[in-house]
Image (cartoon, grey):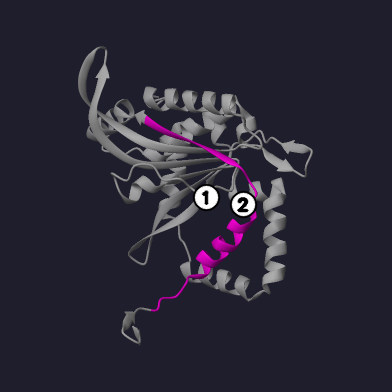
Amino acid sequence: MGKKKDMNYEIQTFYPLRRVISETFSFFEKKHYIHALVEIDITKPRTFIHEHLQKAGEKLSFTAFIIYCVGKTVDENKVTHAYRKGRKKLIIFDDVDITAIVERSVDGESLPTIHITRAANKKTLREIHEELRAAQVEDFDISKHKNLMQNYLKVPRFFRKLLSGRMVRNPFLAKKYSGTVILTAVGMFGQEIGWMIPYPGHSLTITVGGITKKPGVIDGKTEIREYINIAISFDHDIIDGAPAARFVSRLKEFIESGLDLNK
């Protein structure tokens, strides 16, 4: 705690990871994004997950279900996760690699970390679920992670920018280290938070917001339903409005149907 003139203030460390993220964001400033703010009825998949917990004693991962649906939707129109290569080419990967936040228990504390589900479009819902559950309990050396970030920041800023720029502009390095789609489930940290607009870097970014209960009309009858708020961000240099709208409609259809949850 410090004091200057009549102001009290606290000094905290600006963590190395945040510094690295801040530097990387500078490479995304020239991209042009469009955002779709969507409200999706998740009553059916949430009901199935709850009933499965009661019957089998197993809590299915809702994040795994969203990853599964995103993978299937991108698989139908792979240009949505394309990377630009130079000015004249697009790299469209066959595998849909989805980066998501996974909470791990480290020294008794819950720590959000990155996990990439490789080829999510080719995996079953069960495979994705088990992969995320395994990632949550695997060993994570936080001291090694901090040391890596600190050593990276000791490299002169000029060379750091060259290194980061190469990774951002090289589709194959970008896919290796950050996947082709990013999914941020901010709703895990607060239920009624509405939509959150991200600062995207990927061609396709899915930001899952809060879950709310409110009346909905089903078959002409009003009943209480559960809804989730999702912001879907597209790189408008790659994706036009019409295919973006079709993507949103298809993803909404998959999620609301509880796609393959009964398998």
Query: Could you tell which of marks 2 and 1 lies nearer the N-terminus?
Result: 2
* Tag 2–tag 1 contact (CB < 8 Å): yes
Q: Position of residue 21 (x, y in %)?
A: 55, 61
Residue drawn at x 48%, y 66% is 141
Q: Position of residue 225 (x, y in %)?
A: 25, 27
Q: Is residue 172 left or right of residue 259?
A: right
Q: Which residue is mark 2?
A: 28
Magenta span contains residue 20: yes
Q: Which residue is mark 1?
A: 199
In the rendered image, the vertical position of residue 142 relative to residue 39, given as above or below = below
Magenta span contains residue 96: no
| SS category of the residue bearing label 1 | loop
The one nearer the camera, 13 or 55, is 13
Q: Position of residue 205 (x, y in %)?
A: 52, 41
How many labels sit on residues? 2
Q: Amino acid at mark 1?
A: Tyr
Q: Amino acid at mark 2?
A: Phe
Specify the segment rendered in magenta. Answer: 11-39
